[in-house]
Amino acid sequence: MASIDELKRISSQVRRDIVRMVCAAKSGHPGGSLGIADVLTALYFSEMQQDPATWTRRSAGQDAFVLSAGHLAPVLYAVLARAGYFPVHELGTLRRFGSRLQGHPCVTDGLPGVIKPSGSLGQGLSVAAGLALGKKLSGEDRRVFCLCGDGESEEGQIWEAGMWAAHHGVDNLVAFTDWNGQQIDGPVEKVAGIGDLSEKWGAFGWEVIIADGHDFTSILDAFKLARAANGKPKMILFRTEMGHGVDFMAGTHEWHGKAPTEEQCARALEQLDETLGDY
Amino acid sequence: MKTYIDTGKIDTRSGFGEGLLLAGRQDERVMALTADLKGSVKMNAFAKEFPDRFIECGIAEANMVGVAAGLAIGGKVPFIGSFAEFVTGRVYDQLRQEVAYGHTNVKIASSHAGITLGEDGATHQTMEDIALMRALPGMVVLVPCDYNQTKNATIAAAAYEGPVYIRFGRPSVPNFTPADEPFEIGKIYTLNEGTDVTLIACGHLVWEALGAAQALEAEGISAEVLNVATIKPLDEKTLLASLARTGCAVIAEEHNTAGGLGEAVAGLTAATRPCPLEYINGADRFGQSGTPAELMRAYGLDAAHMAEAAKKAIGRKI
């Protein structure tokens, strides 16, 4: 298990990877990826019981991670590569023809660590819930983690899954909402108004935990609380900032789906320490 | 011609229910999920015998598809069952991403397909589902013809590794195929050999095709009858061999023209061996309320219309 200092070092490198990958691809989604980089780093390097050496899609006997908001592919790929699921140099192939690192994650070419395709929003929580229930039915004492966006939570299926998982007592399901308040067309509250997610998930019968998605102590404390086998699925609402770590990308929806130019990339990298060596 | 005996009219959905139960006994990975239609899709016996492997999802089909995909990723073999419209059109994007593109071992049990669902009317009578499922890369599409074959196709679907769509219906229809004939995915069953015309049918219209062949025989016309129980992958070899002998065909299905069995056959023959084809299908129309018999007559989905179409096809041969 990595210390908080180590986690900080890793997430800094993950952010560099994200910026460099998206810049090289000339398209992609850097904002959300930068915003949730700390949470996913903490998940893979501290909390999740999953071994890259023996990983299979079926994840028998291991924890599993389901990315529901598929446009966060850059951060998933960077974290997976840094955690040893595949060679880091492959990060440079993001979105290229023939690459296993498709614009949105897929399982066609068997990229290690990717459990399902995602891109069409609102579907991952159902899959994670089914996988988690399957683990319970098979007598596996293992958990399934799932990352959704707050904008994504405008999809009705998220709430179908919420109702179902609580009804079936799937307490080995731990979902995260990347609560950054931004979506493509602007601030979430202006676009659609999803309201108080804490009250909503509580009303759906979930254990709700709120944490600061950029403070590793807060993230790890939330993970610890979510370990309770109390008959309820867990929802950790991570307060995050889209584009976190790069001043000109932070706190705006403008960088949801836009690649930086070479010059912008250089400016961004000046703000992010190269801690593990660029790919 | 070869004689087929109806051993007693029964609904094909009950064949699914029996097949599911038998598959469940053979393989403990088999699970059943429904969206508030347990009785309608005949999952009661399975749910009673295997309560831990039956999941009620409530009226939330999209979530049901995702849950099934998750169970399949973890090694289970889930069957999701509902009315045909609600496990295809309603959840197309979910099936596309989580089942087809995600290549999960999910079986889609599609009941009450076509207009013979009857009195509920067009909202429930999907005539487009075969087209939707055929369009998904890697999806196996099964349309068995009677109770026995639906039972055996369900067992085969459970044993197959990969996404399968299996379509069946509500009304009682003749049961005439062997009770325990193992179902072969991808095989066309030749029920009668003939030389003048090929009657190509799927689902319960296969029985109508046999009736049409009998009527044609009385007029001195020799009709070959093919039961296309697997629409995808299509048994091209058997189809083309038959058309090489007969030189024309009638294609019958309880489905819209667009994207159905008829277009699958037309696409194949246009690219290889063009020949006169006549269609027996729902044309480009929605259904309406009525009894199954009334609707089949009104939409021309019966032996009499098929025999007429056969003569037309023969007359178009050069």
Image (tube, rainbow, N blue to C red):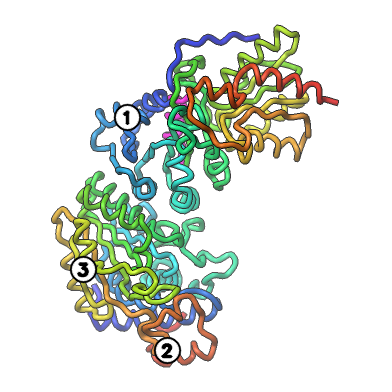
Residue extending farthest front: B289
Q: Amino acid at mark 3?
A: Phe
Nearest the eye: B115 or A238: B115
Q: Residue at x 44, y 73 (%)?
A: A184
First along the sequence among labels 2 and 3: 3
Instruction: Give left or right: position of B275 versus A131.
Output: right
Q: In what element is the residue under mark 1?
A: loop
Magenta segment boundaries in residue numbering: B150-162
The residue indicated by pointer 3 is A223
Q: From what the image shows, is residue A243 above or below residue B41?
A: below
Q: From what the image shows, is residue B318 above or below residue A124?
A: above
The residue indicated by pointer 2 is A248
Position of the C terminus of chain B by quadrant: top right
Label 2 to label 3: alpha-carbon separation: 30 Å
In which chain is the residue bearing label 3?
A: A
Q: Which image quadrant is residue B302 in?
A: top right
Q: Amino acid at mark 2?
A: Phe
Q: Nearer the viewer, mark 3 or mark 1?
A: 1
